[in-house]
Amino acid sequence: MITVGISNVKNKPFIVTKGGYLTLSDGTRAYIPKDYVFDNGSIPKPLKWLYDTFGWKILNYKQFPFLVHDYLYNYRGIRTGRKFQHLPIQRSFADREMKFLMSQNSENTKLQINLYYIFVRLFGWMFYGKI
């Protein structure tokens, strides 16, 4: 099980304290390594009403889509193991994966999910591949 703590990295407030495997919607197993830092969804302040992801101390069901999305964006692919066997992906796959994971949470409305997805599709290119 992947666990998360608070990091000391500017603009990346969360760190994976225990890495682990997860299964993506297409059945691919991905490995998220220990010490991976992420921002938990870059949501501008005016849009916090849409999906507020900050202020959490532990990995929970609302954070998980953003951890996976950030990981896929940063690596432009999937790490299949500790030795970093890399499977390249398209940005659209990372965005669809986030949307799928958000839809698994019954608290999310379709409006929230679709608006967030639209914003990510429109502006995500600026962050794709940047660690």
Image (cartoon, grey):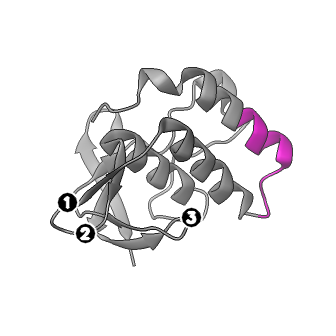
> Is 127 included in the stretch rendered in magenta?
no
* Whole-number angstrom distance, CA of label 2 to CA of label 3: 17 Å
Please tell me how crowded label 2 is: few (under 14), some (14-19), or many (20+) other residues with Cα within 10 Å. some
* Residue type beneath disc 1: Phe
In magenta, the rendered stretch is: 106-116
> Is 108 included in the stretch rendered in magenta?
yes
Q: Are the residues flagged by discs 1 and 2 in contact, CB closer than 8 Å? A: yes
Q: Which residue is mark 1?
A: 84
* Whole-number angstrom distance, CA of label 1 to CA of label 2: 5 Å
Q: Position of residue 8 (x, y in %)?
A: 23, 44
Mark 2, secondary structure of its residue = loop
Can see residue 5? yes
Residue toward you, 81 or 98? 81
Residue at 22% from the left image edge and 61% from the top image edge: 85
Q: Which residue is mark 2?
A: 81
Residue toward you, 115 or 47? 115
In the picture, residue 74 is in which quadrant?
A: top left
* Whole-number angstrom distance, CA of label 1 to CA of label 3: 19 Å
Q: Which residue is mark 3?
A: 26
In the picture, residue 79 is in which quadrant?
A: bottom left
Residue at 52% from the left image edge and 65% from the top image edge: 24
Mark 1, secondary structure of its residue = loop
The answer to whether 130 appears left or right of 101 in the picture is left
Q: Position of residue 93 (x, y in %)?
A: 54, 46
Please tell me how crowded label 3 is: few (under 14), some (14-19), or many (20+) other residues with Cα within 10 Å. few
Residue at 48% from the left image edge and 24% from the top image edge: 125
Magenta span: helix, strand or loop, mainly?
A: helix
Q: What is the number of callouts on the image?
A: 3
Residue at 46% from the left image edge and 54% from the top image edge: 68
